[in-house]
Image (cartoon, coloured by chain):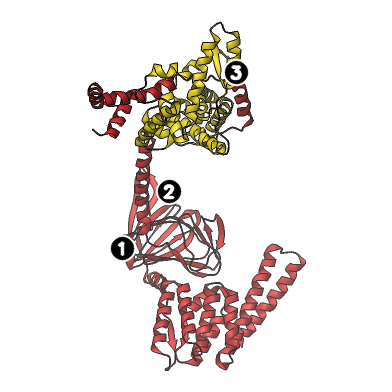
Chain colours: A yellow, B red
C-alpha cells in the first residue's frame, strides 16, 4: 500500500489528502519535497537552522491550505510558491540585520548515511583534513557571493541553476513573466561572477586554484 | 546579431531552454566567434561554481519536531461532511482541465439562468382574492399556516381556500376568470400557470359549491376543476359546480360547454360527457357521468342571475341628491358585519355637485375603474391624491367618508378608518359629521364585539365568558335600536 502511495503523482497525493483526508499522502508529499525546499531556503537565507525552521513552517502552511485550494494542477509550483512567500517574509525581517555570513558550524556532511557537523567529520575522518577544509571553504565563499546578490537575482539563480527548474517553473514560483526570468538570470550570473571575482576570459581551474 | 540577443541565446543554450533552431544558430556562433565563446565560458563559470555547492541534508531532529508541530494544529479539512467526499476519477482529471471546465460551466450556468429567467420576465399575474363575505380562511403554502382571507391577497399553487357558514369568497385572475365559492366549501389551488399567453389553472373542489365565469382574456387558457369523482375542463364558459356528500358532483352550464370526465374507469376508458349551455349533469360513485339533461326555465334563470352578478362590480356612482347619499351611507355604515363589504361594493356613492371640477370627476372615474378591477389599494391611493390636491372642497367630506369605509370594509384597517371618520366628525359640516360619529361608534362596537368573541373562543364556561355574553347581548340590542333610529 505504501509503495502504491509513493508511486502516485504530486497531484494525486494532494487530491488524496484533500478529499480522502489521508495524512499519509501528505507525509509522502512532505518527504518528497522537504529536501529541495530546505536547500532552496538554505541557499536563499545562508542560515541552515533558520532554513530548517522555515521549511517546517512552509509544510505546515501546505498542510493547512491544501484542503482549501481550488486548483491542484501543479503542486510542485504551488509548494515552491509557498516557500518563496516565506522567504520574502524572512528577507523583510532580515533587512534590519547585517548580511549573514555562512558559518562552518552550519555545514553538515554525510558520513555513512548519517549527517554530522563538519568539525566532527574532519576530526574523525581519514581523508586529508586540509583538502576537506579547502573544499568547504570554497563552498562558504560561493555561498557568501550568493548572499551578496539582491533577493530577486539570488532566487532566480537558486531556482534555475541550483534547483534546475525550467524558466517556466521559476516564473510560476516567483509569479513573474518568463522573459523576466531570463533577463534576471543574465544579470544574476554577471553579478555572481563579479562577487566571486571571476573575470571574463578566466578559466575555471584558474579560479579554483587561486 | 546584437550583443544582448547573443547573450540571451547563449544563456538559453546553457540552461537547456534553446529550441533546435536556436541550438544550430548558437553552435555556428560558438564556432565562428571568439567573443561568443568567451562570453559562454563566463556565463558557465557561475554554473560551475554553484555546482560545487553541496546538498544540505535534513537533520535528524527535523522529523520529530515537525511531527510535534503538526500534531499541535487542528485538522485542516472543512467541518461539513459533504465536502469531504471520497476520491473519484474526477479528482484526478480535474486538475488538468479545471480552468477549461470552469469557464464552460460558468457559460452554461449563465445560459441556463437566462432560459429560466425568460418566462419569469414575461409571466402574468397570480389570481387574487376579491370580495370576502363573512369569514373565509386561506391556507398559505408559503407560510404553512391558516390565515384570514382578505381582499387583494394573492393565491398560489398549494394554497387552500375554505369558507364557513353563510360566507363566500371571490377569486379572480386579472382578465381570465372569476369564481365565487359559497359557504362551507373547500377549494385547493393545484396549479397556476403564470404565462402572458395562457393562464392554465387547475383547482380541486373538495366540498361545497362554486360558480365560475370566464372573461375575455381567457381565450387559449384551460381551467380544470377536479372534484372527488371527476374533472371539469373549461374553455370559455359560465357554469356552477357543486360537490355534495360522498363526492357527488353536480354541474350546471349557463354558457358554451364544459367537458365532464369521471374518474371511474373500466378497461382504462375515461367516461366523458359534454354538457352544453342550459344543460346539467352529475357524477355518482362508481358510475359514468349522468346523461346530460336540460334545465328548467326557472333553474336556468336563477343560474344566469347568479353568474351575471359574478365579478361584475358597479362603477362609482356620482350623485347630487344629498338626501339619497346620506341614506346610502347610513345603510353602508350600519350594515351587519358579513354583508358590509358587499353593500359597500354595490353602492359606492360620492357626492358630485355642479361645481365639482372636471379633472376631479376624471380622477373619481379612474378610482371607480380600479375598484371594478379589484385594485382597492390603487383606488384608495387615487382618492387620497384627490384629497391632497384639492383640499377644503365641499365634497371632501363625502370623499373621506368613502375612503374611511374602504379602509374599514375592504382593507380591514379600523384604526386608519377611525382617524378619517374622526376628521369628518370634527369638520363641523352638519350634513356629514353626524354620519361620521355614527360610523365611529359602529366601528368601536364591532371592535368590542370581536374582542368579546375572542374571550368566548378562549374560555366558554368561565366568569369572563358570562360577562362577554352579557356585553354581546347589550351590543346587539343597541345595534338594533341604532338601525331603527
- Say which quadrant the N terminus of chain B sits in: top left
Which residue is located at x 57 percent, y 74 percent? Answer: B337
Name the residue that disc number 3 marks.
B60
Give the quadrant of residue A49.
top right
In this rendered view, identify the residue nearer to me: B210 or B414: B414
Name the residue that disc number 1 marks.
B219
Sequence order check, earlier mark of 2 and 3: 3
Q: Residue furthest right?
A: B463
How many residues crowd around disc 1 within 10 Å: few (fewer than 14), some, or many (20 or more)?
some
Residue B469 on image: x %, y %: 71, 71
How many residues crowd around disc 2 within 10 Å: few (fewer than 14), some, or many (20 or more)?
few
In this rendered view, identify the residue nearer to me: B56 or B77: B56
**Tags 2 and 3 on a common chain:** yes
Q: Residue furthest top?
A: A126
> Label 3 lies in what chain?
B
**Tags 2 and 1 on a common chain:** yes
**Element type at mark 3:** loop
Which residue is located at x 53 percent, y 81 percent? Answer: B332
Residue A1 visible in the snapshot: no
Which residue is located at x 69 percent, y 66 percent? Answer: B456
Q: Say if A91 sits above or below A33 in the image.
A: below
Name the residue that disc number 2 marks.
B286
Residue B365 on image: x %, y %: 40, 81
Q: Point out the frontmost of discs 2 and 1.
A: 1
Residue A171 on image: x %, y %: 39, 34
In the displayed structure, does residue B1 sit left or right of residue A172? Answer: left
Which residue is located at x 66 percent, y 82 percent? Answer: B478
Amino acid at each position: 500500500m505504501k509503495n502504491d502511495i509513493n508511486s502516485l503523482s504530486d497531484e494525486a497525493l494532494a487530491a488524496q489528502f484533500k478529499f480522502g483526508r489521508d495524512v499519509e499522502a501528505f507525509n509522502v508529499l512532505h518527504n518528497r519535497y522537504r529536501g529541495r525546499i530546505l536547500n532552496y531556503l538554505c541557499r536563499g537565507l545562508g542560515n541552515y537552522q533558520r532554513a530548517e525552521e522555515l521549511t517546517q513552517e512552509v509544510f505546515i502552511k501546505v498542510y493547512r491550505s491544501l484542503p482549501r485550494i481550488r486548483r491542484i494542477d501543479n503542486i510542485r509550483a504551488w509548494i515552491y510558491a509557498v516557500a518563496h512567500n516565506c522567504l520574502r517574509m524572512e528577507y523583510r525581517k532580515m533587512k534590519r540585520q547585517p548580511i549573514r555570513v555562512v558559518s562552518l558550524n552550519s555545514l553538515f556532511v554525510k558520513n555513512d548515511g548519517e549527517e554530522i557537523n563538519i568539525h566532527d567529520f574532519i576530526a574523525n575522518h581519514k581523508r586529508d583534513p586540509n583538502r576537506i577544509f579547502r573544499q568547504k571553504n570554497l563552498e562558504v565563499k560561493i555561498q557568501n557571493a550568493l548572499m551578496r546578490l539582491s533577493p530577486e537575482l539570488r532566487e532566480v539563480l537558486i531556482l534555475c541553476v541550483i534547483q534546475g527548474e525550467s524558466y517556466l517553473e521559476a516564473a510560476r514560483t516567483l509569479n513573474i513573466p518568463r522573459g523576466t526570468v531570463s533577463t534576471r538570470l543574465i544579470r544574476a550570473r554577471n553579478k555572481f561572477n563579479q562577487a566571486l571575482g571571476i573575470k571574463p576570459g578566466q578559466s575555471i581551474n584558474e579560479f579554483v586554484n587561486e | 546579431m546584437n550583443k544582448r540577443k547573443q547573450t540571451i541565446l547563449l544563456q538559453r543554450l546553457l540552461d537547456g531552454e534553446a529550441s533546435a533552431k536556436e541550438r544550430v544558430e548558437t553552435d555556428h556562433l560558438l564556432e565562428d566567434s571568439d567573443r561568443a565563446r568567451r562570453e559562454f565560458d563566463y556565463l558557465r563559470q557561475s554554473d560551475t561554481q554553484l555546482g560545487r555547492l553541496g546538498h544540505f541534508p535534513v537533520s535528524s531532529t527535523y522529523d520529530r519536531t515537525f511531527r510535534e508541530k503538526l500534531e499541535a494544529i487542528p485538522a485542516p479539512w472543512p467541518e461539513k461532511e459533504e465536502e469531504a467526499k471520497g476520491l473519484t476519477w474526477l479528482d484526478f482529471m480535474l486538475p488538468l482541465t479545471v480552468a477549461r471546465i470552469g469557464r464552460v460551466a460558468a457559460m452554461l450556468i449563465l445560459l441556463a439562468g437566462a432560459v429560466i429567467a425568460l418566462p419569469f420576465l414575461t409571466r402574468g399575474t397570480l389570481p387574487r382574492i376579491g370580495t370576502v363575505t363573512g369569514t373565509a380562511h386561506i391556507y398559505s403554502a408559503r407560510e404553512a399556516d391558516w390565515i384570514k382571507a382578505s381582499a387583494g391577497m394573492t393565491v398560489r399553487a398549494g394554497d387552500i381556500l375554505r369558507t364557513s357558514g353563510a360566507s363566500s369568497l371571490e377569486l379572480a385572475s386579472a382578465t381570465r376568470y372569476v369564481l365565487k365559492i359559497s359557504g362551507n366549501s373547500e377549494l385547493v389551488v393545484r396549479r397556476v400557470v403564470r404565462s402572458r399567453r395562457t393562464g392554465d389553472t387547475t383547482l380541486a373542489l373538495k366540498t361545497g359549491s362554486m360558480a365560475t365565469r370566464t372573461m375575455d382574456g381567457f381565450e387559449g387558457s384551460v381551467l380544470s376543476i377536479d372534484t372527488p369523482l371527476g374533472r371539469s375542463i373549461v374553455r370559455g364558459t359560465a357554469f356552477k359546480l357543486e360537490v355534495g356528500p360522498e363526492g357527488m358532483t353536480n354541474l350546471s352550464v349557463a354558457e358554451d360547454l364544459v367537458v365532464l370526465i369521471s374518474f371511474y374507469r373500466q378497461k382504462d376508458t375515461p367516461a366523458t360527457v359534454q354538457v352544453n349551455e342550459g344543460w346539467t349533469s352529475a357524477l355518482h360513485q362508481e358510475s359514468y357521468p349522468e346523461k346530460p339533461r336540460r334545465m328548467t326555465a326557472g333553474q336556468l334563470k336563477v343560474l344566469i342571475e347568479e353568474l351575471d352578478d359574478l365579478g361584475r362590480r358597479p362603477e362609482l356612482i356620482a350623485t347630487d341628491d344629498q338626501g339619497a347619499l346620506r341614506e346610502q351611507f347610513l345603510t353602508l355604515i350600519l350594515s351587519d358585519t358579513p354583508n358590509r363589504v358587499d353593500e359597500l361594493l354595490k353602492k359606492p356613492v360620492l357626492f358630485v355637485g355642479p361645481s365639482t371640477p372636471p379633472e376631479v370627476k376624471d380622477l373619481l372615474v379612474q378610482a371607480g375603474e380600479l375598484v371594478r378591477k379589484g385594485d382597492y389599494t390603487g383606488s384608495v391611493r387615487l382618492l387620497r391624491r384627490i384629497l391632497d390636491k384639492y383640499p377644503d372642497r365641499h365634497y371632501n367630506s363625502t370623499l373621506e367618508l368613502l375612503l374611511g369605509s374602504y379602509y374599514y370594509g375592504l382593507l380591514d384597517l379600523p384604526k386608519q378608518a377611525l382617524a378619517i371618520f374622526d376628521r369628518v366628525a370634527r369638520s363641523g359640516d352638519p350634513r356629514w359629521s353626524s354620519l361620521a360619529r355614527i360610523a365611529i361608534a359602529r366601528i368601536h362596537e364591532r371592535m368590542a364585539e370581536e374582542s368579546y368573541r375572542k374571550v368566548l373562543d378562549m374560555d366558554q364556561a368561565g366568569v369572563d365568558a358570562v360577562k362577554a355574553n352579557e356585553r354581546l347581548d347589550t351590543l346587539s340590542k343597541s345595534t338594533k335600536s341604532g338601525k331603527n333610529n
